[in-house]
Image (cartoon, helix red, strand yellow):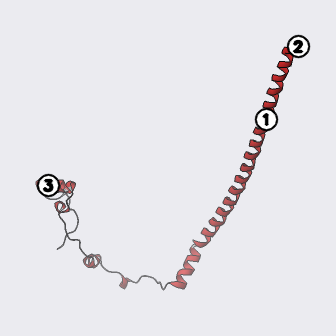
Amino acid sequence: MRYLTALNVVLLAGLVAFTVVLYVRELDTRQAEREIRQLKAEIAREEETLRILEVEWATLSSPVRIERLVRRHLALGPVAPTHMAPLGMVLDGLPLRRHVPHAATGDPLAALISRLEAEGSGAGIGGASQGRTAR
């Protein structure tokens, strides 16, 4: 009989522990469900905001709207043949870069390239000229 009383006490303690664990799990589950509902609501708000922004972007980038703004704020017209310049005239108007030898920069890789150019034909790496220089 004594064993049955001890067994009943152990089983009752186990049942109470199981009930407490189950209750805590239920509270955790309800909290997680609340968080899920909040996150779903936040996602829905963000998706609505995204749809509104997409519509606004489509409106702002509409070619018809841009053309109307250009006509209102810019005095643009078609390009006349007199507005075009020959390529040679454009290139002559550009400032030329002063040629700086590679070795003068203090870069060891540039010094190696300069040495290789001096040993080779002097035409540069790959045998091509390395850009425009002052005339």
Element class at badge 1: helix
Q: Amino acid at mark 2?
A: Met
| Above-or-below relation of 118 to 8 | below
* Disc ID at residue 1: 2
- The answer to whether marks 3 and 1 mark residues whose Cβ atoms lie closer than 8 Å is no
What residue lies at 13% left-to-right and 58% top-to-bottom? 122
The x and y percentages for residue 27 are 77, 42
Looking at the image, is mark 2 or mark 3 nearer the viewer?
2
| Above-or-below relation of 7 to 47 | above
The disc, 1 or 2, on the residue closer to the chain's N-terminal end is 2
Q: Quadrant of the N terminus?
A: top right
* Disc ID at residue 20: 1
The disc, 3 or 1, on the residue closer to the chain's N-terminal end is 1
The x and y percentages for residue 54 are 62, 65
What residue lies at 66% left-to-right and 66% top-to-bottom? 52
The x and y percentages for residue 84 are 35, 81
Classed neighbour count for the residue bearing mark 2: other residues with Cα under 10 Å, few (<14), some (14–19), many (≥20): few
Is 50 displayed left or right of 100 in the figure? Answer: right
- Residue hosting label 3: 115
Measured in 3D between alpha carbons, the distance from the residue under mark 3 to the one under mark 1, in whole angstroms, is 83 Å
Q: Quadrant of the C terminus?
A: bottom left
Element class at badge 3: helix
Classed neighbour count for the residue bearing mark 3: other residues with Cα under 10 Å, few (<14), some (14–19), many (≥20): some
Looking at the image, is mark 1 or mark 2 nearer the viewer?
2
Measured in 3D between alpha carbons, the distance from the residue under mark 2 to the one under mark 3, in whole angstroms, is 105 Å
Foreground of the two, 86 or 48: 48
Q: Amino acid at mark 1?
A: Val
